[in-house]
Image (cartoon, grey):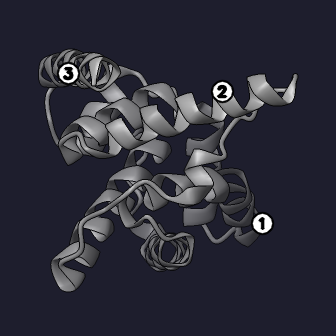
Amino acid sequence: MEEDNLLMRRAANGDKEAFETLVLRHREHAVRFAARFTANRYDAEDIVQECFAKLYVRREQWKDGASFKAYLYTMIRNRCTDFFRLKREKPEVSEEELELISREGLPETTVLAREERERIFDTVSRLKPEYRTALYLFAYEQMNYREIAKVMGKTQAQIKITLHRARKSLKKQLLRRESE
């Protein structure tokens, strides 16, 4: 988003309000992204806080023209990787994620919809971390291939292949679970 890059440029020149605007705009999505890795909102909030603090301290090093969102999500992904290197825990889908986007309607419909979401999230949590990340950035953060490539440190072609394989794997696992 052009406006984010302008705000970051202003922050690099000492405008604290511009940086606060960026934090307010991106904090919640960033925490949800980190929580996909940590499966714990508190750890995710800590990671995002650290990333914003690091970004603020290094704001004068900001390279104009870079995508702020891709840069931020790359920082978060890298910090989450470090987090797991230290903790040696396997990420899982959090309870909060299972409650995303509830449907209105009859109790039976709500229960069935919740069970379906839980089944999908459980299946997604069993995918390779690379597939989970790519799917999340594409579906929930609505990033394009170029932005996802920057966040994940891959080429756009590799991201297209990764997303194709992720969808194929997800479909295969969902069909397998359905037949059980």
On residue 50, which mark appears? none
Q: Position of residue 119 (x, y in %)?
A: 45, 35
Q: Position of residue 29 (x, y in %)?
A: 60, 50
Residue shown at 59%/32% (left/top)?
A: 2
Q: Position of residue 171 (x, y in %)?
A: 28, 16
Question: Which of the two discs, 1 and 3, labels the residue nearer the N terminus?
Answer: 1
Q: How many marks?
A: 3
On residue 17, which mark appears? 1
Establish if 146 lies above or below 79. above
Q: Quadrant of the N terminus?
A: top right
Q: Mark 1 and 3 residues: CB-CB less than 8 Å, in contact?
A: no
* Disc 1 versus disc 3: nearer the observer: 3
Residue shown at 48%/52% (left/top)?
A: 33
Task: Answer whether residue 9 is visible to the viewer in this image.
Answer: no
* Disc 1 versus disc 2: nearer the observer: 2
Residue sitting nearer the eye, 170 or 36 = 170
Residue 159's quadrant in the figure?
A: top left
Residue sitting nearer the eye, 54 or 98 = 98
Mark 2: which secondary structure?
helix
Instruction: Measure the alpha-carbon separation of dots 1 and 2.
Output: 42 Å
Q: Residue at the front extreme?
A: 180
Amino acid identity at mark 3: Gln
Amino acid identity at mark 1: Glu
Establish if 176 lies above or below 71. above
Amino acid identity at mark 2: Ala
Q: Position of residue 178 (x, y in %)?
A: 34, 20
| Residue placed under numbered mark 3 in the picture | 156
Mark 1: which secondary structure?
helix
| Residue placed under numbered mark 2 in the picture | 113
Residue sitting nearer the eye, 11 or 34 = 34
Q: Residues within 10 Å of mark 1 (few under 14, many from 20)?
A: few
